[in-house]
Image (spheres, rainbow, N blue to C red):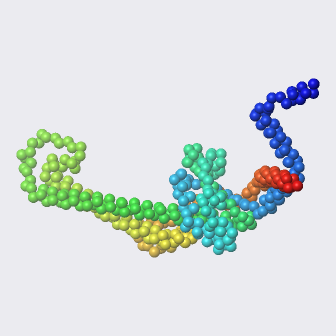
Amino acid sequence: MTVSQNGAAKSHSPPMSAQETSVCEDEIDLRNYFRIILKRKYFIALASVLPALAFGLIVFLWPGFYKVTYIYDVDISAKQYRILLDRFYCSENLDKIITRLKESGLDEYAQSLAQTATDKHLKKLVNFEISPLSAGAATPSKAATPERLLKTQEGTDTLLAMTIVGKPGKDMQKISLIIRDSLENVIPIYSVKQELSETIAGLRTRMAGIEQGGFALVIELEGKKATLLKLKNLKPQDFNEIPTNITLQFSDMAANSTYLPLAYQIQAVESGIINLEENIKTNQDQYNYCKDLLWLNEKILEQISNKTSLHYTIQEFHSFLTAAVDSYESNQLTGYLNAYITKTENMISMNVPLVEKPKIYSVPRGTVRKTLLAFVVLLIAATVAAFAAEGAWKNRAHTAKEAS
């Protein structure tokens, strides 16, 4: 009787809820997972640790990248910096650099530079940064002048850093010198070309203004001459008939010369004619001078335009200007060219890095970080493969059991 009651009690026990069943299944599944991991632990370890170590060894032994940074103390605005980047990264300038690299036997780096698909990849090889030069960072010789110190304090004094990245390390010196040559000696030609274009436009505008003003002066001169002719044809009045007790006061004698006696009026008009003639002559001289400068600047611009597509440097441009001075007899043109040569020499002397030969550093490879990342990926892959292998083994065992 007792046994039947116990059996009845067991047969009539309340069923488990859905939540309890789910918790039970989760516990069973977790135990199965841990059991599979323990069972396949050697496979998981070998499939993750060894390949990760091999990958880390390859990263460590693989030829690394090196970098060198040239720093220039320049006065450059945000707009000028943007123009500098556009000029350096333009296809024409990059083609010049690639050609020079190939001529120097640096085909690998030339190919890397030529195959950059995006601006981001290109800047990984050659990158520019600009930052304000703080008062503490300024060298004593440069910060000693009040003007220099004021610019530094106002944040208008800046540093331009050009970082070049490449490999192998033994070629970095030659690579960096070629790219540095482009920045210091080729890029300034583009600035000179733009300044020449602006100068030519300014001269043409000035000449147009002189022509317009000269035309107005000629019309005024003709009017003065006509007035003078009529004044000379007038009959002088008898001064005895003019009241002597009248006093005339003028703040501007030229504008009120009509109130003067006829002789003085004639003299005033003649003086005005002389002044107008001198102004016309001065205007003509200015026009001729501007015309000569326009011709000279157009000739210089033509020289640069014909050589821009080639590896034309600021030094070669300086040599052209020096040779051109002796071919002119005009003192005005010679003086203008001498001033232009001095300006070019200042550009050359200022466009040099603060450190002539900076140290070449190896770029951190991140071996440990990359090895750990590879280990995590391989560990996940090995664990998934272990579960898949265990599932396949169970399926084969179940199929064999059903077949028997």
Is residue 141 depicted above or below 346 in this figure?
A: above
Q: Where residue 120 sits: x, y (%)? A: 62, 57
| Depicted 247 relative to depicted 126: above or below | above
**Residue 282 in view in this figure:** no
The image quadrant where one finds the C terminus is: bottom right
Report the residue at 85% width, 42% height from top: 31
Could you tell me which residue is drawn at 12 percent across and 56 percent down? 231
Along the viewing direction, whichever of 345 and 169 lies nearer the viewer: 169
Residue 166, by quadrant, is: bottom right
Taking the image as drawn, is residue 275 in sight? yes
Q: Looking at the picture, how far across and down is residue 260, in whole percent? A: 16, 48
Q: Quadrant of the N terminus?
A: top right
Q: Residue at x 76, y 63 (%)?
A: 63
On the image, the x and y values in percent for residue 344 come to 53, 64
Within the image, what quadrant is residue 81 found in?
bottom right
Position of residue 71 in the picture relative to residue 401 (left or right): left
Question: Quick one: 356 or 66, which is closer to the camera?
Answer: 66
Q: In this orientation, which residue lies closer to the viewer: 224 or 188?
A: 188
Count numbered badges in the picture: 0
Outermost right residue? 2
Most foreground residue, 108 or 195: 108
Relative height, residue 297 to residue 18 (above, below): below
Q: Position of residue 94 (x, y in %)?
A: 59, 66
Q: Residue furthest front?
A: 1
Q: Quadrant of residue 234?
A: bottom left
Q: Name the residue rendered at 43%, 67% in the picture.
A: 297
